[in-house]
Amino acid sequence: MDQIENLNLESEDSLKPPTYFQMIFSQMIRDMKFVGMFAIIMGVLNCLSIIGAIIGIPYIFIGMRIRESAEQFEIFRMTNDARAMRMGFELQSKYFKIIKILIIVMLVLMVLGIILFIALLIPLISSIYEYQQYGS
């Protein structure tokens, strides 16, 4: 109990509470690590099939890029090294480029899938209609 009473709370060396930006920055780093790990896991699971490997391999790369970016931001947070921050932004830029390409490819594949579905559905509906015509 004597140790608590002898604490000098007015010292300039005492710990300052983190600012709002520091808390947000730390949370962003944790979120980037989580998203990176999730992307890597999803990429590995997609690679279990041959067709899924087309999407899975880029997912592994984007997961690695965002995790590397988070590590650089962590280094910047600890050391205040501007090179680490720059490298973090460069790696994050690569992440966004790859994810942008994946989104465009997925949208194109979705549109092609819808067109294929409609192209297969129209003959099916017309054959059902013809079958009903002959049945009556």
Image: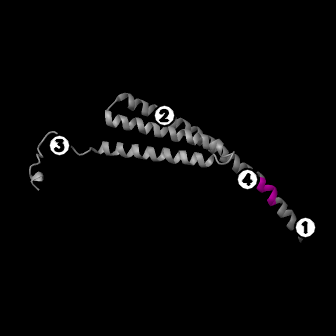
Q: Nearer the viewer, mark 2 or mark 3?
A: 3
Q: In whole angstroms, how far apart are the C-alphas of marks 1 and 2?
A: 62 Å
Q: In whole angstroms, how far apart are the C-alphas of marks 4 and 1?
A: 26 Å
Specify the label residue 61 is tagged with: none
Q: Earlier in the sequence, mark 3 or mark 1?
A: 3
Q: In whole angstroms, how far apart are the C-alphas of marks 3 and 1?
A: 90 Å
Instruction: Read off the residue under disc 3.
Output: 14
Horizontal side of 49 relative to 59 (left or right) equals right
Quarter holding the C terminus is: bottom right
Residue type of the residue flagged with mark 4: Phe
Task: Give coordinates of residue 83: x percent, y percent.
Answer: 38, 28
Magenta part of the protein: which range? 120-125
Secondary element type, mark 3: loop
Q: Earlier in the sequence, mark 2 or mark 3?
A: 3
Residue 83's place in the image compared with 45, above or below, is above
Instruction: Read off the residue under disc 2.
Output: 93
Instruction: Read off the residue under disc 1.
Output: 134
> Among all residues in the image, which is located at the extreme bottom?
136
Instruction: Read off the residue under disc 4.
Output: 117
Contact, CB < 8 Å: mark 1 with mark 2?
Answer: no
The kind of secondary structure the magenta stretch mainly shows is helix
Q: Residues within 10 Å of mark 4 (few under 14, many from 20)?
A: few
Q: In whole angstroms, how far apart are the C-alphas of marks 4 and 2?
A: 36 Å
Q: Residues within 10 Å of mark 1 (few under 14, many from 20)?
A: few
Question: Which residue corresponds to the image point at 72% horizontal and 49% vertical from the top-left?
Answer: 115
Horizontal side of 124 relative to 59 (left or right) equals right
Question: Which residue corresponds to the image point at 80% horizontal and 60% vertical from the top-left?
Answer: 125
| Picture quadrant where residue 18 is located | top left
Question: Which residue corresponds to the image point at 60% horizontal and 49% vertical from the top-left?
Answer: 45
Q: Earlier in the sequence, mark 4 or mark 3?
A: 3
Q: Nearer the viewer, mark 4 or mark 1?
A: 4
Q: Earlier in the sequence, mark 4 or mark 1?
A: 4
